[in-house]
Amino acid sequence: MKNIDQVDPIIITRDVHKWFGDFHVLKGISFEVKKGEVCVIFGPSGSGKSTFIRTINRLEEHQLGQIIVDGIELTHDVRNIEKIRMEVGMVFQQFNLFPHLTILDNVILAPNLVRNIKKKDAIDLAMGLLERVGIAEQAKKYPGQLSGGQQQRVAIARALAMGPKIMLFDEPTSALDPEMIKEVLDVMIELADSGMTMVVVTHEMGFARAVADTLYFFDAGQIVESGTSEQIFKNSQEERTKLFLSQILSQ
Amino acid sequence: MTITSNTPTEITNPQSKFSLLAWLKKNLFYNVLSSLVTLVFIYLIGLTIKKILVWAAQSAQWDVITTNLRLLMIGTYPVEQVYRIWICILIMGFLIGLSWGIWIKGRTVSNVIMFAFPFALALTQMRTDFWGWLVGVGVLALTGFFIGKRFPKSLVVPVLVLWMSLIPLTVYLVGGSETSRILRKVTTDKWGGMFLNLLLTWVGIIFSIPLGILLAIGRQSRYPAIKSICVFYIEIIRAVPLITILFMAQVMLPLFLPEGFAFDRLARAMVGISLFSAAYMAEIIRGGLQSIPHSQYEAAEALGMNEVLIISRIVLPQALIAVIPVIVDQCIGIFRDTTLVLIVGLSDLLSVSRTVLANPLFMGTHIEVYAFIGLFFWIVSYFLAFIGQKIEHLACAYRRN
């Protein structure tokens, strides 16, 4: 059984609202993530799940409410934002690797330049992570020469290189061919088992069932229902949840 | 119904081997009409080439070029000091050899052309010791090549630094100084000919690219002051012809300087050309910057990188690589624009050619002179484009699958 910190949650959002112009995309999201917890957020597209996860590291700004990450509140203060971003790693749906750098350079760039880790140490760190995700032999190649699954694993290694306390995943397998989804999910499962705090937006319910501690169903900018995977899959309370689950689980 | 596929007996692609006959048949002679058209064109082209060759060999008076070659290449530079220009060419030949050894792989025909460039450049002087210098350039270039091949990694930075400092080095060697006895001062009004065009081109390229980068980044700045200065600069400069800028530089620059400090004529032209080209470079680079997807910024931000890091390490490299062809285009444009300095009283190649043609001895030899000048401009432009292609190949290694 994982050791979940029972004290202060590492992510707290209180009544967060966001508008894109007139469109009210987040309507009062309040949730908490404890250290070591794995949260899965799922729901129909347009429900605001990606937007919400991006407010946690300030890639999107929220207009109302509070977001507190690792004890630091997210405001317009640039220093807070920078501090938070060093502790929060993110993996994107489109991988977003830097195409002009080799895999190794992609991974060592941030530790070397942001955390001021010496190049040699950064290389050791990077190679260790690349081994962990299973692509150490591709270190000298360029992203364009790798498959989607390989690129996403590099992206995970790149995010981990900064030594974050929290890892955010924005639909990490949605852009992958089916045969490559497993290799990425395996890495994510290993990461979850190692005790990393993870917030994952995904449609992969198998993954959720395997490792998620808490599931959140998002719809139209609100959390409709939340609970453990047992509660959600076997015994969901809301109609909308039941409907959505029946749609995606029947595939 | 199942279809079992047996391994087919080996069939080779019928079109895999190139056959000249097959290519001719497919592209030039595929039906009666096209064959006729082909024959007509062959005849016309053949006729034209024959006419040009006959003219060049028989009725053309090439002595206008041979007599005035030194004038055309270096203007009225004192003859006894020409060795100093040769030294610059030697250094450049050496640098070219070094660069070729460090960066260029393979021995294709185009690489050989690049190697021949120092020789072409060495036509700067046409006196008896010409061949000696020429051989010297060749030897140094070859030496450079082997050194570059031997130490590719460690020499990259020194060579780049040397390329950058070629300008002050050349200026010092060629211009000399008041006090020196060996490098006696040769004022810039005596510099001329093709040498002047090349010098101005190189100065223009070296200064307008960094300035263009700064302007392009400044134009996207969040701070209104920086943004408006950059926009203002770019829009004003782009609205006026280079001649106007050159005139303005000649007249206005001395006003900005304290009394008694004479701003050299050539320097004014250099400033004018650099400032002019920087505005165009800025727009080119801005196009490149806009082509970078926003997700690249986001990925870098998520890693905790600040704006300076993101622009310098992620965005700018990709943007510059994307617009290399356009930048090379602009550099060739700078080279062509250098002929305009004729209008502000500097004796570049075109200006010298007018002096040459004014000489009653060489009446009517316009075609020969302009053909020669045209040929020279073509060689240099081709060389610049070639360099650009090589840089692009090197930089785009990551795009090859």
Image (cartoon, coloured by chain):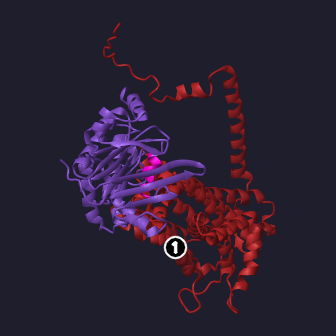
Chain colours: A purple, B red
**A218 relative to B41 in the view: left or right:** left
Residue drawn at the location 36% of the way across and 43% of the way down:
A226
Residue A204 point in image, percent of width and height: 35, 37
Would you identify the image quadrant in which residue B180 lies? Answer: bottom right
Q: Which residues are magenta?
A: A49-57
Which amino acid, mark 1? Leu
Q: Nearer the viewer, residue B167 or A209?
A: A209
**Can residue B390 be seen from the camera position used here?**
no
Q: Nearer the viewer, residue A59 or B310?
A: A59
**B280 relative to A11 in the view: left or right:** right
Q: Nearer the viewer, residue A58 or A10?
A: A10
Question: Is A55 part of what is drawn in magenta?
Answer: yes
Question: Is A152 part of what is drawn in magenta?
Answer: no
Majority SS type along the magenta span: helix
Q: Residue furthest front?
A: A237
Against B168, is A33 above or below?
A: above
Would you identify the image quadrant in which residue B243 lies? Answer: bottom right
